[in-house]
Amino acid sequence: MESLSTYVQIMIYLLVFIAASPNDTAKKLSDMMKEKNIHKVPIIKENQLVVGIVTATDLIRKCTIYSDFQMRQICNFLARMAF
């Protein structure tokens, strides 16, 4: 059986490929979700510490608060995604 540290290292390795930074925009997150066909994106700081997760639902909630053009585009995309 693999040790916990090996498991954690593997998970960190995977997160490097499908993760975002705290400075990424909602548009970038929605594009990433579309490209990777995923509904959740972990948010990772430079030191590889996971500080949160943004979900498609989080972005939809944001759409109800903001009504600028970029957020409407994100909402339109998310509405077409199969949950």
Image: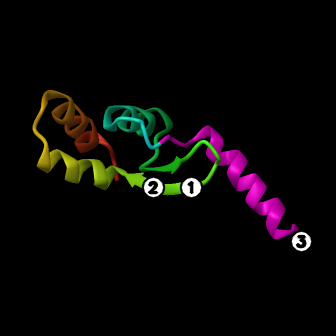
Would residue 54 appear left or right of 68 to someone viewing this image?
Answer: right
Residue 22: image location, x then y, percent: 45, 43
Residue 70, relative to residue 17: is it above or below?
Answer: above
Between circles 2 and 1, the one closer to the viewer is: 1
The quadrant of the rendering that contains the N terminus is bottom right
- Disc 1 element: strand
Amino acid under disc 1: Val
Farthest residue, direction front: 47
Would residue 24 appear left or right of 63 to someone viewing this image?
Answer: right
Amino acid under disc 3: Met
Q: Is residue 2 found inside the magenta-colored segment of the image?
A: yes
| Residue at image point 25% right, 36% down | 74
Would residue 49 appear left or right of 64 to someone viewing this image?
Answer: right
Per the image, the residue denoted by label 1 is 50
Q: How many marks?
A: 3
| Separation of marks 2 and 1 at Cα, in angstroms | 8 Å
| Residue at image point 72% right, 46% down | 13
Which numbered disc covers residue 53? 2
- Disc 2 element: strand
Residue span colored magenta: 1-21
Which numbered disc covers residue 1? 3
Residue 42, relative to residue 34: is it above or below?
Answer: below
Query: Quick check: marks 2 and 1 in contact, CB under 8 Å?
Result: yes
| Residue at image point 45% right, 35% down | 32
| Separation of marks 2 and 3 at Cα, in angstroms | 29 Å
Disc 3: CA contacts within 10 A as few (<14), some (14-19) or many (>=20): few
| Residue at image point 50% right, 41% down | 20
